[in-house]
Image (spheres, grey):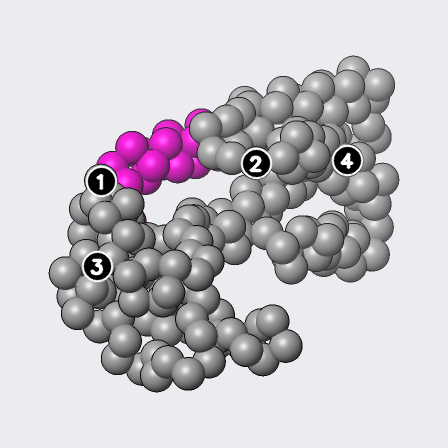
Amino acid sequence: MLNSIIGGEMSVLSFLLCIFTAMVLGLLAALVFAGRDRHSAAFRQSLALLPPVVAMVIMLVNGNIGAGLAVAGTFALVRFRSAPGSAKEITALFFSVAIGIACGMGYVGYAALFFLVMAVYALALGRFRFGEEGGVSRVLKITIPENLEYDALFDDLFREYTAHHELVKVRTTNMGTLYELTYAVELKEPARSKEFIDAIRCRNGNLNISCGRDEDRELM
């Protein structure tokens, strides 16, 4: 079961078995890694399509001197997603590529066993919320007039409503007449977020305020 099904020469049956296994495991990988989180349909389809595509590439170069270069080039396929994707998305893509490499080399038993172990591992990490902090992380953007000193303007509110806060960016808007402050905050009690925003409105002259998730940092 754990030996390669590809002998000296590849048969049509072994080819179909490798590709079909890669397709099934790719589909299951998409369900495990992107089933519950907010991801685009294109990302889910990429997770499902990568294993059979990678398997085909590996089978075509099997036994060739350039096989090592082909493997390196295969891993380079994740570059298209590395800029906008989160760490979890990039890891999921590497996972799909690894399944494709195993199937392409004929180790369908290893591929299935690897998927089973990693799927249970990933689901357990999500179930027990491994690595997540106790509070709720949010990105807070506050617009203030240019005449306000923002360094300690909201410190007392942050102490009351947040467990942690950090000013990560300041930029001018409206031809330099306004400042937009961007904070990374961890709310102590998400149920009091409206109360928190109302308190800020009293300080910034009822200008624009936004408080939401950071899509670039989600589920790192």
Report, in whole angstroms, how far the alpha carbon at label 1 lies from the one at label 3: 12 Å
Give the secondary structure at mark 4.
Answer: helix
Q: Which label was assigned to residue 39?
A: 2
Of tags 2 and 3, which is closer to the observer? 3
Mark 2 Cα shell of 10 Å, populated few (<14), some (14-19), many (≥20): few
Residue 60 is covered by the magenta coloring = no
Point out which mark residue 191 bears.
1
Name the residue that disc number 4 marks.
53
Q: Earlier in the sequence, mark 1 or mark 3?
A: 3
Determine crowd level at label 4: few under 14, some 14-19, many 20+ residues with C-alpha closer than 10 A.
some
Asked whether disc 4 touches disc 1, contact meaning CB atoms under 8 Å apart, the reply is no
- Furthest-top residue in view? 13
Residue 162: which numbered mark, if any?
3
First of labels 3, 4 by sequence position: 4
- Judging from the image, what secondary structure is the residue with disc 2 in? loop
Identity of the residue drawn at 32% across and 71% down? 166
The answer to the question of whether label 1 and label 2 lie on touching residues, with beta carbons closer than 8 A, is no
Question: Residue 68's image quarter?
Answer: bottom right
Instruction: Give the magenta-colored segment's residue range.
Output: 116-132
Q: Nearer the viewer, mark 1 or mark 2?
A: 1
- Asked if residue 143 is positioned above or below residue 55 in the image, the reply reads below
